[in-house]
Amino acid sequence: MMQTMKAAIWARVSTTDQHAQNQLDVLRTWAAQRGLEVVGEFVTEDSAWGSNGTKGREFDARRKELIDGARHGDYTTVLVWAIDRLSRQGIEDTLATVRRLAESGCIVWSHQESWAEDLRNPHMRELFLALAGWMAKMESDRRSERIKAGLTRRKAEGKQVGGRKAGSKDRKPRATDGYAQAWEEGGARRAAQERAS
């Protein structure tokens, strides 16, 4: 009896107006068509651009979990929408991620780049992955330049740049009762909790 291959799904979006669910639906269907058993899904709605401040922290943590799962033998295939979902930091980061997965006996299949799974020669595969990583970084850089140019133009026109418009309210009101109470108590509650533990 042939054993079903186990797979993990990796989905990433970097802005709140995108939805990871779109990638998940396609990748789940693709896994079923390929006869793969999906044993894990790794979803991040975080920027892939490093850990400067809060950006990238979730991405880094989820990608580490993905690689750890491959290393533990939880799955042998990782399904991604496109190679650039694994990284936006260019060639070396893309290659390093795919290499780490490969060293754990795990291959990456890209829904949008069917050539990634068809290349049997590892040197050719690395060359094409390098090109894909480079193209993803160039696209990300261009997008960043367009956004900066738009912000500069808005500022020159005297329009508001960043932040909320005057008089706007949060879409989801924040609960402040706990903060207000802690402030009024001058930290007495926290001090009491520290003494108790």
Image: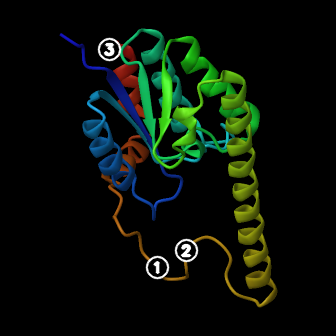
Helix, strand or loop at label 3? It is helix
User: Residue at label 2?
Assistant: 164
Label 3: few (<14), some or many (≥20) within 10 Å? few
User: Residue at label 1?
Assistant: 168
| Residue 117: % across, % down | 52, 33
Label 2: few (<14), some or many (≥20) within 10 Å? few
Marks 2 and 3, how far apart at CA: 42 Å
User: Residue at label 3?
Assistant: 196
Q: Is 148 displayed left or right of 163 in the figure?
A: right
Q: Nearer the viewer, mark 3 or mark 1?
A: 1
Q: Is 96 displayed left or right of 85 in the figure?
A: right
Badge 2 or badge 3: first in the primary sequence: 2
Contact (Cβ within 8 Å) of mark 3 with mark 1:
no
Specify the amino acid type for callout 2. Arg
Badge 3 or badge 1: first in the primary sequence: 1
Marks 3 and 1, how far apart at CA: 42 Å
In the image, 20 versus 109, the foreground residue is 109
Residue 108: image tag: none
Q: Quadrant of the N terminus?
A: top left
The residue at 46%/48% (across/down) is: 45
| Residue 144: % across, % down | 73, 62
Query: In which quarter of the view is residue 73 placed?
Result: top left
